[in-house]
Image (cartoon, grey):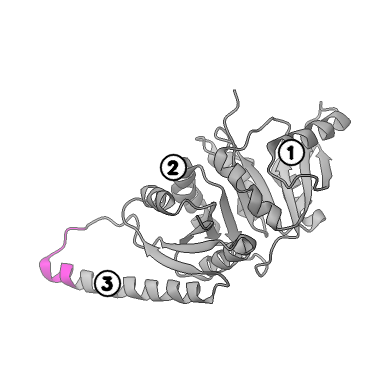
Amino acid sequence: MTPSILVLANVSATTERAARYAAKLGAPLHAHVTLLNLATLNVYPVLLAPELAMMEAREAAQERNERLDGLWAIARKLPSPAVVEEAAGPMADAVATAVRQHQPLLLAMGLSAEHGFLDHLLHNQILPVLRATHLPLLLVPEAAPAPVLPKRVLVALDADPFTPNSAARHLAPLLAACTATYTVAHLAEEDESLEFAEQLVRARVRASMLLPENTPVAFYQRVHYPPAEGILQACADTRADLVVLIARPRSFLGRLFHRSVTAQVISHSPKPVLLLPVEESD
């Protein structure tokens, strides 16, 4: 089956940026891109008088056609084959249906710089989708640079062990195709042995088999630094094109999502962020 990437889309500059970045990332594997129209999701019927209902239906049809025209215009400008699809129902269910149909390597979504909207998006759309699909998710901020194939990738890790889930492991060929350099950022705790921590983190990265075999991995370590701030500083210091975060079920998919390091990095990163889901540890 031809590799594919599913872009959760609306008609906006952020969607176009995300779609172009996804297409660029998938280009070495000749990945097919599908733009899933989000604007038709989570729409529920409203009781109206017949005349108003007819007017509402006409306006809705016109808006739908305009949205589809806009998405097809984005799709036609991508450097790889792309199509536009629609789905109905709650977002998580619609995305899960599209995932079953296309079996994508990852999902992609553009992020607006408007924090009120971003917070709503994180809680009400991104979180349910990750719970439903357990797929890697690429988030492209509105202010991200022009899409390029990543040449410098930052992988942020803590001291806890992790095991990539099957979907994250399937993404390894795409990462290998980037021929990028990799830096592992580790935010050390006060009582950690720094030398031992470096050896342990390096060993866990190799054991995960996420990164290309025999690829040199640089190590970036900070002590006594808030984790989110440390990751963002590491991104700036290493001039990373892409930030990779581990999405743990407890810390990311749990009820305290809004307090997580992951959410803070997503909210402030100027570069695209790739969330890699892992299995829950015992």
- Check disc 3 and report its element: helix, strand or loop: helix
The residue at 83%/32% (across/down) is 199
Q: Is residue 201 visible?
A: yes
Foreground: 116 or 125?
Answer: 125
Q: From which residue to which does the magenta span run?
A: 46-54
* Rendered location of residue 270, percent (x, y): 67, 60
Q: Which mark is residue 125?
A: none
The residue at 44%/42% (across/down) is 132
Q: How many neighbours does mark 3 have within 10 angstroms: few (below 14), some (14-19), or many (20 or more)?
A: few
Question: In the figure, residue 206 lies in which quadrant?
Answer: top right
* Rendered location of residue 232, percent (x, y): 73, 51
The residue at 69%/63% (across/down) is 149
Q: Is residue 49 magenta?
A: yes
Amino acid marked by disc 2 = Ala
199 with respect to 115 (left or right): right
Distance (Cα) linking label 1 and label 3? 50 Å
Q: How many neighbours does mark 1 have within 10 angstroms: few (below 14), some (14-19), or many (20 or more)?
A: some
Q: Which residue corresponds to mark 3?
A: 61
Q: Nearer the viewer, mark 1 or mark 3?
A: 1
The correct choice, above or below, for 134 with respect to 180 in the image is above
Q: Is residue 263 visible?
A: no
Q: How many neighbours does mark 2 have within 10 angstroms: few (below 14), some (14-19), or many (20 or more)?
A: some
- Check disc 1 and report its element: helix, strand or loop: helix
* Rendered location of residue 171, percent (x, y): 61, 48
- Earlier along the polypeptide chain: callout 2 or callout 1? 2
Amino acid marked by disc 3 = Ala
Q: Nearer the viewer, mark 2 or mark 1?
A: 1
Q: Which residue corresponds to mark 1?
A: 205
Q: Which residue corresponds to mark 2?
A: 132
